[in-house]
Amino acid sequence: MAYDEELASRIRQILSQSRGVTEKKMFGGVCFLLNGKMVCGVLKDELIAKIGRENHERVGARKHVRPFDFSGKPMMGMVYVAPEGLTTEKKLSQWIEMAKDQIEAGAAKGQKRIRSK
């Protein structure tokens, strides 16, 4: 199993009311993008959520949360959330809303997507 399809389906349902959402296979899992920027994803049975650098220490210290370290080097502003932290739709929705807020805040500040050459 590359990723938990049930969790991906729950995320799709939550994001279904948002415009500009796309899906892309990444990291051996699936990622959900808002206007081309990663909001969240699923890898194995965990949620990957973009929480923002400014929230990394505070949010990363929560129960069932650990740094996103797919390549062995933790990425600031992104975390894994274990299934135990996603037991209700309310809990999952809170993570997704936090991640969407990060994308929308960046867009409001005029941050541009950095592309590698």
Image: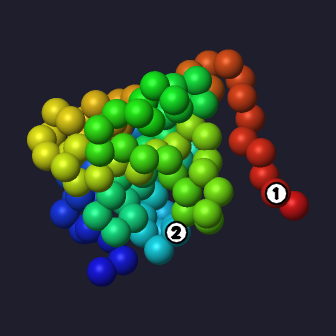
Q: Is residue 25 left or right of residue 9?
A: right
Q: Is residue 92 left or right of residue 114?
A: left
Residue 33: give x, y in percent of width and height.
Answer: 49, 49
- Say whether residue 106 is visible: yes
Q: Looking at this rendering, what residue extends furthest in the left direction?
A: 88
What residue lies at 43% left-to-right and 47% top-to-bottom?
66
Residue 41: give x, y in percent of width and height.
Answer: 41, 55
What residue lies at 20% left-to-right and 36% top-to-bottom?
91
Which mark lies nearer to you, 1 or 2?
A: 2
Q: At label 2, which amino acid type do we have?
A: Phe
Q: Earlier in the sequence, mark 1 or mark 2?
A: 2
- What is the quadrant of residue 105 in the picture? top right
Q: Looking at this rendering, what residue extends furthest in the top direction?
A: 109
What residue lies at 29% left-to-right and 38% top-to-bottom?
63
Residue 9: give x, y in percent of width and height.
Answer: 22, 58
Q: Quadrant of the C terminus?
A: bottom right
Q: Quadrant of the N terminus?
A: bottom left
Q: How is the image coloured?
A: rainbow
Q: Which residue is mark 1?
A: 116
Q: Is residue 16 left or right of residue 78?
A: left
- Say whether residue 23 is visible: no
Task: Mark 1: give few (<14), some (14-19) or many (20+) Cα within 10 Å.
Answer: few
Q: Secondary structure at mark 1?
A: loop
Numbered label attached to residue 27: 2
Near-viewer residue (104 or 45): 45
Task: Mark 2: give few (<14), some (14-19) or many (20+) Cα within 10 Å.
Answer: some
Numbered label attached to residue 59: none
Residue 2: give x, y in percent of width and height.
Answer: 36, 77
- What is the quadrant of residue 86 in the picture? top left
Near-viewer residue (80 or 19): 80
Near-viewer residue (72 or 10): 72
Q: At label 1, which amino acid type do we have?
A: Ser
